[in-house]
């Protein structure tokens, strides 16, 4: 691996050289003359490509509603999370940070609780202030994604501003995104100073706090019809017939 030290740097492929950026350094590497792939490596490459496309789709789906700057490694971190989780394990996205330098636990002594009915409850507590912060903005985002058709089926958001110079009595935020698909719930926190918003990446966070899959629809309970009982007729009474007037006694022949 070589490092570019010139004033003008570049990324991409030139001839048999590939230039790329790793962190704050611009690096160079040469392309291999031959590439040998086994069935396992081809399978792994195919799965990594699918995970990368899913990661890009997730980022594009939530990017319009996120107001913070993500870190430079968010693409690799999200792809790695998807690859490690395996296929269709969307629940593993819970806890992912779009800003790797800060999480929501940095601002709350008691973490907010999100329930499946779309409500976020923040208990009354002393919020963790940082620096000369005077106000905290809390934004609850919900995006429902159908990964089968790769479409966003709905979005919703709720916003709350908290005066950090006053005691915090607690609050509730609500989002409602009905429809088909997996619901990604993101909690975003931004800190404001006296002269405006703080752009310090240590004072901004956006974490996926809940991943809720499709809720199977319960089939209506059908009442079973009672079985028909067979009608059992009572036995007919035995009738003793008396002989008529013209009836004669029967005399057996000898």
Image (cartoon, helix red, strand yellow):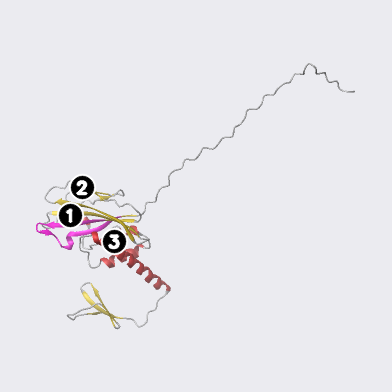
From this view, report whether residue 199 is shown above or below residue 116.
below
Residue 91 rendering spot, x and y as whole percentages? 33, 57
| Number of marks drawn | 3
Callout 3 touching callout 2 (CB < 8 Å): no
Earlier sequence position, callout 2 versus callout 1: 1
Q: Specify the quadrant of the image occupied by residue 94.
A: bottom left
Q: CA distance from mark 2 to mark 1?
A: 12 Å
Q: Is residue 71 magenta?
A: no
Q: Which residues are magenta?
A: 186-210
Q: Badge 1 local density, few (<14 within 10 Å), some, or many (20+)?
A: some
Q: Mark 1 or mark 3: which comes first in sequence? A: 3
Residue corresponding to mark 3: 61
What's the mark number on residue 171? 2
Q: Which corner quadrant of the image does residue 208 belong to?
A: bottom left
Residue mark closest to the camera, 3 vs 2: 3
Residue drawn where x is 26% and y is 65% of the image: 74
- The relative height of residue 232 versus residue 74 in the rendered view (above or below) is above
In this view, the residue farthest toward the right is 254
Which residue lies at the image location 18% right of the left edge and 63% below the top edge? 201
Would residue 195 be counted in the magenta stretch? yes
């Amino acid at each position: 691996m070589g490092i570019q030290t010139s004033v003008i740097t570049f990324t991409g492929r030139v001839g048999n050289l590939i230039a790329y950026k790793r962190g704050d350094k611009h690096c160079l590497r040469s392309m291999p003359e031959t590439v040998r792939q086994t069935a396992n490596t081809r399978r792994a490459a195919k799965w990594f490509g699918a995970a990368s496309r899913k990661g890009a789709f997730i980022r594009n789906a939530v990017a319009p509603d996120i107001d913070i700057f993500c870190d430079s490694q968010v693409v690799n971190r999200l792809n790695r999370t998807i690859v490690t989780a395996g296929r269709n394990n969307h629940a593993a996205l819970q806890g992912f940070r779009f800003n790797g330098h800060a999480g929501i636990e940095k601002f709350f002594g008691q973490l907010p609780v999100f329930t499946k009915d779309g409500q976020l409850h923040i208990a009354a507590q002393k919020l963790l202030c940082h620096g000369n912060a005077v106000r905290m903005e809390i934004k609850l985002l919900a995006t429902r994604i159908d990964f089968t058709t790769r479409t966003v089926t709905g979005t919703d958001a709720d916003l709350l501003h908290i005066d950090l110079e006053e005691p915090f009595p607690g609050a509730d935020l609500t989002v409602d995104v009905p429809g088909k698909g997996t619901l990604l719930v993101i909690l975003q926190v931004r800190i404001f100073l006296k002269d405006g918003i703080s752009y310090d990446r240590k004072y901004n966070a956006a974490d996926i706090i809940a991943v809720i899959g499709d809720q199977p629809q319960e089939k209506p309970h059908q009442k079973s019809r009672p079985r028909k009982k067979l009608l059992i007729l009572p036995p007919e009474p035995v009738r003793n017939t008396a002989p008529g007037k013209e009836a004669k006694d029967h005399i057996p022949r000898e």
